Structure formats: structure tokens, C-alpha cells
Amino acid sequence: EIVMTQSPDILSLSPGDRATLSCRASQSVTSNVAWYQKKPGQAPRLLIFGASTRATGIPGRFSGSGSGTDFILTITSLQIEDFAIYYCQQYHNWPPGVTFGPGTKVDIK
Amino acid sequence: QVHLVQSGAEVKKPGASVEVSCKASGYTFSIYTIHWVRQAPGQRLEWLGCINADNGDSKISQDFQGRVKLSRDTSAKTVSMELSSLRSEDSALYYCAKDGAAVYPAYWFDLWGQGTLVTVSS
């Protein structure tokens, strides 16, 4: 199974700051990584797929980069509504299919 | 508007089965694969499997082989997930999610249901 790890566990930042979230795969997943935002009581929201392609309707302050085993989600100029948990997901091969990282919580400093 | 609407919360005893349904609207149901993902308290998201809404073919995670059954009703635009031999560790929020790519699944998810809480308790 491909294991996804994320760092840091918690990122404490202020509105207007830049957030840099990391995700690492236990083996190469080429560019088969997606990022999701999750808020309490809500379903996950797709932000990025293919490591760097923004999903429909996602603001330009969200960007993704990386390939192979190391990936980054960047949020430039954090807005109040961006404080949430962010999960990366790989979908490289079958089996085993899809696995998610443990999440990074972005909270208000 | 594109929506996935799931059935309501369930409370089950250990050893029982639970069925969760997911009704799609606002898009062409048959050309997108539907996936099932769960999240137990304090745990990461976990993929259970997926079903081709057109032909009904399913793929189940190895961790859930033999316990998860997926089905679909194309006339009702509804997909269902049955999880059997329930144990306390199966208590979680269960989501259905639409694949982001038409016809051939890409295994990333651009639309999620609201979630169904399943509680397993004696």
C-alpha cells in the first residue's frame, strides 16, 4: 500500500499569511495527487487534481506542485474561510487504489 | 445544481449489516463512477470502493473485500453501499463521491454527498 504522510500536523497562521503544506508518498505516484479542504460538518471539497490543476471554481490563491513522491499545496494570502483541514490523496495505481494523508490543520494564530 | 444526497444516520449492533444510499441529480448519472469513502473519528479518510454507474462493475478495497457490496439503480439514479459483519471500528461518517472524470474513472472526487453517520454499538 502507498502510504501518504503530511506535514506539519498543525499550521498556525494569521489571515493574509502564506501557507505551505507538504505531502509525501511512500513511493512514486507520478502526478496522481489530489488535495481536498475539509471543514467541520461539511463534506470534503476538491481543490487540486493531477498535482497542480485547480478544480472548477477554486480561487487562484490555491496552487499545487510536485511530482514523484513530494507535493506541496500553497495558499497565498490566507482568507478567514481557508482555515480548515487539508488532505492529500494519491490515486496512482490499482491495487490498492486510493489512499489519503492524515491531514494538516490550518488554524488561526 | 449538481448534488449527491445520502440516506440518514444509522445505529446498528455488532455483526449486523448497514446499507447507505446516495441519490445523484444534476448530471448524467451513467457516465460517472461513484466512490465510497469513510472517516472514523480522529482518523484519516479511507476509500472503500467504487462502482461504474453504467454497467454496475465494482472495485472494492482489499481491506473491505467480502464485507462491502455496491449496487446501483440507474432509473432512480441511486447508488447503494452495504457493509456487513459490522464491528465498533466501523463507526464512521460514510461519504459517496463522484469521480471527476467521465466514462473512465480518474479516482479523484469532485462532488461529495453530505455524509451518513453509522454507529455500531451493542
Image (cartoon, grey):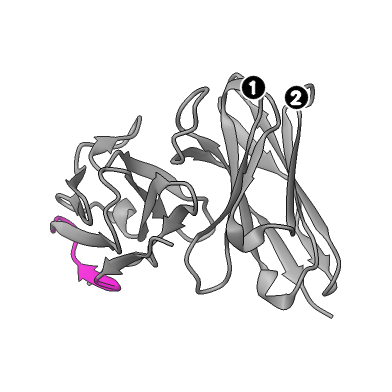
Locate residue A96, reporting x and y percent: 49, 54
| The magenta stretch spans residue A12 | yes
Residue at position x 60%, y 63% in the image? B63
Q: Please state the extent of the stretch shown in magenta in the rendering.
A: A8-17
Q: Is residue B46 left or right of residue B19?
A: left
- Snapshot quadrant of residue A39: bottom left
Which residue has dot 2 on it? B74
Q: Dot 2: what SS?
A: loop
| The magenta stretch spans residue A94 | no
Q: Is residue A62 left or right of residue B92?
A: left
Q: Is residue A58 left or right of residue A12?
A: right
Q: Are marks 1 and 2 in contact (CB under 8 Å)?
A: yes
Locate residue A13, reporting x and y percent: 19, 67
Q: Chain of mark 1?
A: B
Query: Which sits in the foreground, A79 or A37?
Result: A37
Locate residue B61, reporting x and y percent: 59, 54
Q: Chain of mark 2?
A: B
Query: Which sits in the foreground, A35 or B54?
Result: B54
Q: Amino acid at mark 1?
A: Ser
Q: Quadrant of the N terminus of chain B?
A: top right
Q: Which mark is residue B30?
A: 1
Residue at position x 40%, y 43% in the image? A46
Task: State whether residue A66 appears in this view.
Answer: yes
Against B63, is B51 above or below?
above
Locate residue A80, reporting x and y percent: 29, 55
Q: Dot 1: what SS?
A: helix
Examine the residues drawn in magenta and state their main secondary structure.
Answer: loop
Q: Is residue A27 left or right of residue B68?
A: left
Q: How many marks?
A: 2
Q: Amino acid at mark 2?
A: Thr
Q: Which mark is residue B16?
A: none
